Every structure is written in C-alpha cells, then in structure tokens.
Image (cartoon, rainbow, N blue to C red):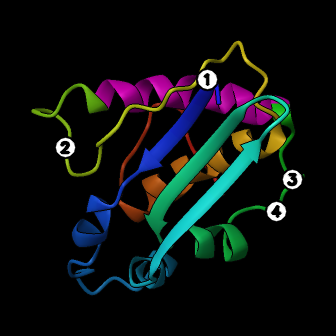
Amino acid sequence: MKNIIYILLLGLFVYGCGSSGGKNFPSDKIKNAENDTVRIANDSLEYEIIIIEPGFNLFINSIAKPRGFYSQNYLENKNRFLVPEYNQRVTQPMTYNPELYLNEINYDPNIDYGYEVNYLLYNYFVYFSRNYNQRFSVPTRI
C-alpha cells in the first residue's frame, strides 16, 4: 500500500473509562463499548484507513449521519482543515493531552481517497470531539 491512514488510539480506552461526572450523554454508552476496529481499504487507489477506538463502530452505526448525507466535497473540505489541526496537537504534548493525541494522521488533501475514507475520517473527528470534549477550529457537527 502506498499510504495508510492510521488512527490508533488504544490508550484512549483507559482514558475514556473514567467517571462521566454524572453526565448522561449518548457518548457515555460509547465509552463503555468494547474496542472496535474499522478498516476501510480502497485497493484500486492503494489507501486504507484503520480506526481502532472503543465505541467508534457503535457511533458510526447509530449516531453518525448516514453515508450519502454529506457530499464527498464537503467531507474533503472538513478533513483538509481538521487533519492539520489534529496533527499540530500531536506535536505539542505539553499543550495537548498526549494520551489523546498519539499519532499523526497521514492525509494528503491533493489525493482523492474516495468517499468512504473521507466519511470515516470526518466522522472520527466528530466522534473524537464529542467523546473526549475536544474542540477544533472547524466545527464538527452531527
């Protein structure tokens, strides 16, 4: 494979199991879900995205907007801004929690990764911001 986009956040399982502080959000159910692994590969383009995150599969199947709700152009535009901001946080462990921001995401906005990769990547940011109360300069909505 030429490029692989990895989001390996196994350490978040431990971080996410903390007390919810009495809040009863849908993400509380997600925090208690077992580890999920979502792998999408586009062999013709030689790209894949692997997301290992507790509750992400549940989020995709029950909370996220369905496939086709957003256009590929919309998803690409969001990812074009979200990925660099996320990667910047990975490189600043004194400012941002290094238990949340473990690995950089290898995403080139000049490459057409296809709809599914962009859909999962964008929804990962939505999940991440909701589940870990993180805010990015580009709003992630559901």
- The span from disc 4 to disc 1 (Cα, nearest Å) is 21 Å
Q: List the residue tagged with mark 3.
A: 69
Q: List the residue tagged with mark 4.
A: 66
Please tell me which residue is depicted at 60% across the width and 76% down the height of the picture.
58
Q: List the residue tagged with mark 2.
A: 98
Q: Nearer the viewer, residue 73 or 4?
A: 4
- The span from disc 3 to disc 4 (Cα, nearest Å) is 6 Å
The amino acid at mark 4 is Pro
Please tell me which residue is depicted at 36% across the width and 49% down the height of the picture.
134
Q: Which of label 4 and label 2 is nearer to you? A: 2
Please tell me which residue is depicted at 46% across the width and 31% down the height of the picture.
137
Label 2 Cα crowd, 10 Å radius (few <14 / some 14-19 / many 20+) = some
What segment carries the magenta color? 73-89
Place of residue 34 in the rendered image (x, y in percent of width and height, measured from the top left): 44, 82
- The span from disc 1 to disc 2 (Cα, nearest Å) is 22 Å
Q: Nearer the viewer, residue 2 or 79?
A: 2
- Residue 41 painted magenta: no
- From the viewer's perspective, is 73 left or right of 99? right
The amino acid at mark 2 is Pro
Q: List the residue tagged with mark 1.
A: 80
